[in-house]
């Protein structure tokens, strides 16, 4: 027999588990209450019986057998909850409240406290007198005194209380089952919404989102996290589509030039004119540009896929920056640019040295490329007051407008004033990916400002987390 779906849900099974634990704990608790209460009732009865025996022994010592009988009769008339029996030395009944002809079955024949039952004859047979507790005591004259107390009512009262508690426990179990069904339905509805969105995404609808109900519970947090993940996924896929379009757009021209030059070279060779070596050299340069674009795209993809930079080690920031400065200082002199480096000593960073070196090279490439002759480029390393490490490059070029700074770090984005410059628009994108992979960030600010025909310039900072 297959159970309804709601009974197979995890919340309902958890409800059953907790109800089972509750039932077990409640059973142990009720058993403890019952045992303790019965023991307390028994103890109180024993104390009362012992006091009554001691009292009657005192009466016997002062007035003998007759005095004891008279006192027992008086106390019986006072509705005291005791059973009395006085026997002579030969075991014959002198007086007692246990009916004549009844049979007292003692569980213990010692003189200590005993538990016994009395069975009195009735019209249709034996009639039970229920259970009682009593104490048998030999008097100094040889008589036997027995004082007992009926504990049936007290134990029955305890049993009624325990039975009421059992009934309450059963009601709790029933209510728990109902609550489990209600909770299971609510959870199933929430999970059904999540499953519907997952199914829609699997079907290709990246715009599907989970509706937030404002409950502020775990499912609401999960739904919000799923929506955020889908937003990022949609943005990433949109970026991939844009990147594909941009690659096709940006590589169309160099590939077309490459094909045209090869065709021209073939025609020139067939006509016996032109320089085929020069045509091949130019074609090789165009092919290298295409390869550089693909290498940059693969490097960005590698960093973003890994989530963090691989092979991170500690290195000296001054040494790394000095190596980069040594490469770019001659290039700046060749282009008529003033180059300066301010490198702080004793700063240790942790990361992938090759990726960070490539990022600094990209920043300096842009600075040298867009700064006109007579301008200046400065490379700087320092520790910020926050403890973060900073590699920065400042130039006196045209800079980037404030509203465009967020766009220039996107892949294949090139501003209008840079269309006539060689490049693919991947330089700062790679720098941003390197910064993110190291837990840092890329910052773009205005440079030294407008000075004559130059400026306002641009300051690009690669900021890495503090070490230690």
Image: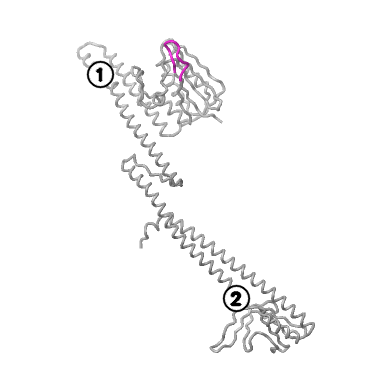
Task: Measuring from the top left, give residue 327's x and y in whole percent.
Answer: 45, 16
The front one of 75 and 347 is: 75
On the rendered image, what quadrant is the N terminus found in?
bottom left
> Which residue does the numbered mark 1 point to in the structure image?
262
Question: Crowding at label 2, few (<14), some or many (≥20) Cα neighbours within 10 Å?
Answer: few
Q: Are marks 2 and 1 in contact (CB under 8 Å)?
A: no
Q: Would residue 428 appear left or right of 61 to someone viewing this image?
A: left
Q: Would residue 136 appear left or right of 131 to someone viewing this image?
A: right
Q: How many marks?
A: 2
Mark 2 secondary-structure assignment: helix
Magenta-highlighted residues? 446-457
Task: Measuring from the top left, give residue 410's x and y in whole percent.
Answer: 38, 27
> Which residue does the numbered mark 2 point to in the structure image?
153
Measured in 3D between alpha carbons, the distance from the residue under mark 2 to the one under mark 1, in whole angstroms, is 115 Å
Residue 345 is marked as none
Q: Earlier in the sequence, mark 2 or mark 1?
A: 2
**Residue 316 higher or lower than 52, as above or below:** above
Q: Main secondary structure of the magenta part?
A: loop
């Amino acid at each position: 027999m297959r159970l309804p779906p709601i009974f197979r849900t995890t919340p309902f099974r958890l409800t059953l588990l907790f109800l089972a634990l509750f039932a077990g704990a409640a059973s142990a608790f009720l058993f403890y209450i019952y045992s303790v209460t019965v023991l307390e009732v028994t103890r109180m009865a024993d104390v009362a019986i012992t006091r009554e025996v001691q009292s009657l022994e005192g009466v016997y010592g002062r007035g003998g057998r007759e005095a004891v009988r008279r006192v027992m009769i008086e106390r019986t008339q006072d509705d005291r909850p005791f059973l009395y029996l006085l026997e002579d030395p030969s075991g014959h009944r002198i007086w007692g409240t246990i009916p004549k002809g009844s049979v007292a079955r003692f569980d213990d024949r010692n003189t200590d406290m005993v538990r016994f039952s009395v069975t009195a004859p009735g019209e249709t047979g034996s009639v039970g007198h229920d259970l009682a507790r009593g104490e048998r005591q030999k008097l100094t004259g040889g008589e036997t005194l027995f004082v007992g107390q009926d504990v049936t009512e007290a134990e029955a009262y305890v049993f009624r209380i325990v039975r009421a508690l059992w009934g309450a426990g059963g009601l709790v179990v029933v209510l728990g089952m109902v609550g489990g069904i209600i909770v299971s339905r609510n959870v199933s509805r929430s999970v059904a919404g999540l499953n519907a969105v997952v199914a829609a995404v699997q079907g290709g609808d990246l715009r599907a989102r989970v509706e937030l109900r404002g409950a502020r519970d775990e499912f609401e947090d999960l739904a919000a996290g799923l929506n955020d993940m889908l937003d990022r996924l949609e943005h990433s896929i949109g970026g991939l589509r844009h990147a594909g379009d941009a690659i096709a757009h940006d590589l169309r021209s160099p590939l077309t030039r490459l094909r045209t030059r090869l065709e021209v070279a073939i025609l020139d060779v067939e006509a016996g004119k032109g320089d085929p070596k020069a045509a091949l050299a130019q074609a090789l340069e165009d092919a290298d540009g295409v390869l550089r674009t693909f290498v940059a795209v693969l490097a960005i993809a590698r960093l973003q896929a890994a989530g963090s930079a691989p092979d991170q080690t500690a290195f000296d920031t001054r040494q790394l920056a000095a190596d980069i400065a040594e490469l770019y200082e001659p290039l700046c002199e060749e282009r008529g640019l003033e180059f300066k480096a301010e490198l702080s000593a004793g700063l240790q960073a942790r990361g992938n040295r090759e990726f960070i070196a490539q990022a600094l090279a990209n920043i300096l490439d842009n600075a040298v490329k867009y700064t006109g002759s007579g301008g200046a480029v400065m490379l700087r390393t320092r520790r910020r007051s926050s403890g973060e490490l900073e590699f920065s490059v400042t130039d006196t070029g045209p800079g980037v407008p404030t509203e465009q700074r967020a766009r220039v770090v996107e892949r294949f984005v090139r501003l209008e004033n840079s269309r006539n410059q060689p490049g693919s628009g991947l330089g700062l994108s790679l720098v941003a990916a390197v910064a993110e992979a190291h837990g840092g960030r890329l910052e773009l600010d205005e440079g030294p400002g407008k000075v004559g025909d130059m400026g306002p310039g641009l300051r690009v900072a690669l900021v890495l987390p503090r070490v230690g």
